[in-house]
């Protein structure tokens, strides 16, 4: 299996707290796992470092943040360097749109950003699946509930998947109805059928997802990432 991401002696600390101490582990092509851990343990921070690098924005948001070590991509480039190019689709925990934009334009921007034209048929299918068709050309500002906002963010990232090898999902089910959580699970299962090597790291506290097959959690006592069984309770059945 091809190694897509390699954490090498990564140490992450805040002003008064060590979040990860000297972790080394790899993520291989086609792996799909849940990154678990208690609230505030640094899961979102870890995904953002992979997706965007050790940016000045991150340094200013997290007080006293210090990150050392390396996160290598498959070509040996360091993903901690914000200038390193990456083909990663990233669903953030709290989404941020160009609020003057429309859903359609957001989808176009997301696709162009990942170097591909918008597949409008696929957009229409996703809108129908999530019951959002009526919102397609509406302005996003003052027009979306929290759950609808999350769905717009999710579907723009799903549209990017044609050109991304890696999908990072930070609590994608937040604000979603039970129905739409189930639809999202089904859409992801289909994406994996279409692209079996798609690699997924998902942060969630949900136990009903069936497109991941294990979980990873940082073990503070021994200072390393530990693999665990992910048991899905099939409550979407
Ligand atoms: N501006 C900030 N935004 C978020 N977390 C911050 C910030 N500044 C400091 N922190 C601290 O950074 C640590 C890691 O936060 P992070 O958001 O990565 O945790 P998390 O594991 O994703 O938590 P959750 O499960 O609640 O989403 C937390 O202990 C938090 O207190
Ligand atoms: Mg988080």
Image: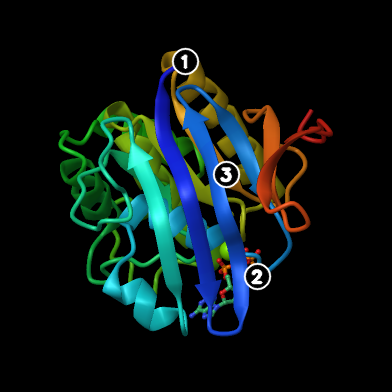
Q: Nearer the viewer, residue 39 or 3?
A: 3
Query: Which residue is the site of mark 3?
Result: 202
How many dots with numbers? 3
Tag 3 secondary structure? strand
Query: Which residue is the site of mark 1?
Result: 1
Mark 3 packing: few (<14 Cα in 10 Å), some, or many (20+)? many
Q: Earlier in the sequence, mark 1 or mark 2?
A: 1
Tag 1 secondary structure? loop
**Residue 109 falls left or right of residue 237:** left
Query: Which residue is the site of mark 2?
Result: 40
Mark 2 packing: few (<14 Cα in 10 Å), some, or many (20+)? few
Mark 1 packing: few (<14 Cα in 10 Å), some, or many (20+)? few
Q: Is residue 33 above or below residue 17?
A: above
Q: Which mark is residue 32?
A: none
Distance (Cα) linking label 2 and label 3: 16 Å
**Residue 207 falls left or right of residue 115:** right
Q: Is residue 93 visible?
A: no
Distance (Cα) linking label 1 and label 2: 32 Å
């Amino acid at each position: 299996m091809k190694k897509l991401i390699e954490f090498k002696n990564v140490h992450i600390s805040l002003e008064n707290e060590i979040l990860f101490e000297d972790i080394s582990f790899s993520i291989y092509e086609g792996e799909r796992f849940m990154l678990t851990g208690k609230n505030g343990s640094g899961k979102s921070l870890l995904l953002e470092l992979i997706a965007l690098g050790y940016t000045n924005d991150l340094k200013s948001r997290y007080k006293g943040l210090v990150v050392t070590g390396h996160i290598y991509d498959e070509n040996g480039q360091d993903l901690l360097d914000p200038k390193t190019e990456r083909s990663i689709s990233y669903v953030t925990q709290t989404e941020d749109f160009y609020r003057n934009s429309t859903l359609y334009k957001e989808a176009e921007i997301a696709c162009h950003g990942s170097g591909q034209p918008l597949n409008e048929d696929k957009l229409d299918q996703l809108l129908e699946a999530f019951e959002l068709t009526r919102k397609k050309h509406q302005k996003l500002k003052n027009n979306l509930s929290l759950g609808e906002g999350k769905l717009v963010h999710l579907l723009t990232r799903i549209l990017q998947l044609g050109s991304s090898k890696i999908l990072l999902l930070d609590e994608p089910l937040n604000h979603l109805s039970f129905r739409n959580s189930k639809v999202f699970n089904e859409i992801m299962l289909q994406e994996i059928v279409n692209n079996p090597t798609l690699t997924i790291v998902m942060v969630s506290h949900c136990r009903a997802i069936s497109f991941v097959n294990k979980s990873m959690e940082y073990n503070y006592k021994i200072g390393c990432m530990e693999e665990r069984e992910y048991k899905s309770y099939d409550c979407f059945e």
